[in-house]
Each structure stands twice: as C-alpha cells, then as structure tokens.
Image (spheres, grey):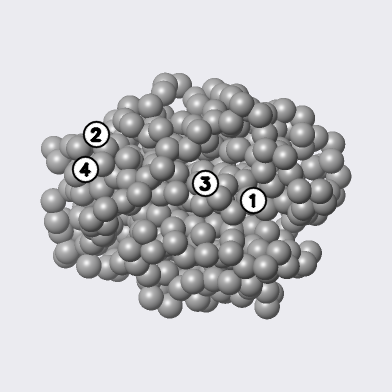
Amino acid sequence: MGSLKSFTVSILVAGLLAACQSPKTEVPPPASLTSPQIEAPSAPEPMMVDAPPLVLMIGLDGLNAPMIDRWDAPNLKALAARGVRAEGMYPVMPSVTFVNFYSLATGLYPKHHGMVENYPYDKVAKEQFDRAAGPQQERWWQGEPIWVTAEKQGLPTSIMFWLGSEVAHDGVRPTRWTPYEHNKPYQDRVDEVLAWYDAPEAELPRFAAVYFDRVDTAAHYFGPMSEKAKEAVAEVDGYVGQLVEGIRQRGLLARTTIIVVSDHGMVWVNPDKVLDIGEFIDLKQLTVPQFNGPYGGSNHPFLHIYGEGEALEKAYEGLKDFDEHIHVYKRGEMPEHYHFDHPTRGPDVFVVADPGWSVRNANVGGWRAPIPGQHGYDNYDPTMAATFIGAGSIFPQGVTAAPFENVNVYSFIACALHLTPAETDGDPDVVERVTGGRCPASIVRKAQE
C-alpha cells in the first residue's frame, strides 16, 4: 500500500446499512425497555488469572459528541467515568456512515480503503456501488478490518451489522457474522450479542461488534435538536447499559474492554439554504453519483464529480465562485485532512457545502424537500464530531481526551487484544496519549513496520 502518513490532529473547537444520506424507515422503540444504569466501580474487578482479554465495540450511528451532555445518558456517562471519553472524535471525510464505520474497522483513510462515499463510483470500472449487492462484493472493501486481523491470529470474532463484515477478505470472515437487517428490533440485537457470551470459554468472541442506527434515524427525520433525537439517545443509552450489565453478570467485565463509537454528528438543514447548481454540470459528459437513485434531484451536502476535459473545467470554474457557502476542489488540491483522494474512486472535482447548506440539481428527477437533519460536511466542523468512549485495561479511568481521528480506534483494539496490527493510518503518538502510555507509540510503530 506504500507509506502511510500520519496526520496530527488539532483541538476541536466547541463542544448501516441504511445510515446514509437518505433517511430510513424508523424502527419504533420496544414497548418496554429494561435499561439498568451501570455504575462506575471505585476499583477494577479482579481478572481471572490468564484470562484472555475481550473487546466489545458498540457503534451508535449519528451520535454527535455533545448529545451525551445535552440529554440524559447515564450509562454512557458511567462508562466514560470508568475510562476515557474524547471531547470529540474526528470522522474521516466525507462524514457519512459507510465511509466512517469502515475507517473505524480498518484504521485507514478512505483513500486507502476505497469507501469514499456511501455508494462510491469507480471511474476506471465505470461502476457504482450497488445498494443491494455491494455489501457482499469484496472488491469495494479494501484494507484489513480488525476482525480479519484477529481471525488471522487465531482469535474468534462475532460481528453484527458492521460495514464490511458481510464479505470475506482474502478468504477470511468473522467466526460469526450477520447480514444487515435494518428492521431487526434493537432489543433482539442486545439479546443476541449477550448470548454470544454464554458460549464456552474457547468459543467466546475475543472481538465483538454491534451496530445501532437509532439516533441517526431520529435526527435525520426530526432534526438533531428534536425531542425524537433526545428519546433516541436515551434509548441507545439503555441498550449500552444492558450490554455492560449483561457482561458484568457473566463475570466477564474485568477482562472486557468496551468501546463506544459513532460515525459522525448531525446538523439542522435549513430548507431555504439549498443551492441549485445544475446549470454547471453536463450530465451527458460528467458523472455525479449523488444524482443517481430515487432521490437524485434532492439536496446533498456534497458532490463527487467525475470526468475530464472541457466539461469538467466548466463545472469547476462555474461552481468555485458560484456561492460563498459551497467549496470546490480539484483532485489533488483538497484540504490535507480530507484524505479521500483514492486513485480510482476519488472525485475529479469535489463540492461540499457549509453545514446546514446543501446543493441540488433541478434538472434531475426524484426531488423531495430537505430532511431536517443531515451530515456529510467538513469532518473538522464541530457539528460533525463523533463520539468515543473506551473503558478497560488499556484506558486510564475518568480521563477526558483531546480530539483525535477515528483511524486510531483500530490500534486501540489491536493493543487491547495483543494483536500484531496491519498497516494503518493511525498515529502511534495519539494511541499512546489516549491510553495513558499503556499502548506505547514505539511498540505500535514497530508492530506496523
């Protein structure tokens, strides 16, 4: 893959398959939900001698970092008190679901793992990711997910609904994996994950991961500051409480590192802040994947434009000075922190709006009014800040960490499980800082050489 450069993050300013730019059919919460509030223990529980470590990663789609403080989330706060909580975690660009959950899994920027959008377009193959078949087609999913690293080194893994887990990577799959079912009740997900930990010791998942779309769904449909979003945060907080308490009841908490992550934040979209840019784009000569599909003519936070020659230059020249609330970049000239200039899937021209603004093409069918909540904007904007909480043996207790990029999460997991990691875009110095020296930068670097 060549030399991967680490990017030193700056301080953040303020404080799956369906989780994408288009909203989803909302799954109602269960009629009753047992949501035990977990407590922050005063001292770690004793660990069974020679017990191998376990890691559970919980993905909460759309959970903007400040949501935990804005609303009632006692279980997430208690988990943070037992470990490390980041002020915010930088998603990769663009700040959408497929891209970021796969960066969390691989430790790679989009330019190296290939998922540069929820439904990327490959200009060499002249093919766009198919919503139905793409999740099972290995060619779209480059890099090595953490569960593959674990399986290669003899550790059994169990994955529910994580992006990239439905394909074999070089013939390697998780020991247990689940095809995505968007309408699978959330309580059933919790119960199934806890059942994994009822297995005999030799069959316990050393690494496990589960995904919930609940907050993203509510924030898309009703807005990130809505009462529905508040209810969704309380609901997923309850599921986290059940998972932690279930692991505790099974006597496994002391040896389990629990990591809670989200993929991006969310911002309110003003229906009066939609810019029509169709006049600049000749769709007979240029390809814009966002304009495809049933809602192609609707508003979009960003556009990938593929093509060459006069048509591409006309699009660039017309768009770059069209409005101060959109930003236009040519391939190779994007901001350094974007990292999605993939050789065959990176756009020739990239257009991104300011948070709350969007673009559309009135010449394309499938228009609908802007949905209240949206993401996909600049990954360093505070409204896009994701959540990170980690509790377990590699994390100090009760620490608030400065913001860092999500490509470091792979290395946390590898360290906790004593794995030799694949090459990633993570920063060993960040890994050492967040873990309080428990995962030394020198060891991380050596393992990646």
Residue hosting label 4: 228
Q: Between 430 and 290, which is closer to the camera in this rendering?
A: 430
Q: Which mark is first along the chain, 3 or 4?
A: 4
Q: Position of residue 188 (x, y in %)?
A: 39, 64
Q: Is residue 69 left or right of residue 135?
A: left
Residue at 13% x, 37% y: name it: 272
Q: Name the kind of residue labelled 2 in the image.
A: Met
Foreground: disc 2 or disc 4: 4
For mark 4, give the secondary structure.
helix
* Up/down of 342 relative to 192, above or below: above
Residue kind at label 4, given as amino acid type: Lys
Mark 3–mark 1 distance (CA, rounded to whole Å): 10 Å
First in sequence, mark 4 or 1: give its number: 4
Viewer-nearest residue: 264 or 58:
58
**Total numbered circles:** 4
Give residue 252's mark.
Answer: 1
Disc 3 marks which amino acid?
Answer: Val
Disc number for residue 225 = 2
SS of the residue at dot 3? helix
Residue picked out by circle 3: 244
Q: Which tag is nearer the camera, tag 1 or tag 2?
A: 1
Amino acid type, label 1: Leu
- The image quadrant of residue 128 is bottom left
Give coordinates of residue 239: x percent, y percent.
Answer: 41, 49
Separation of marks 2 and 3 at Cα, in angstroms: 27 Å
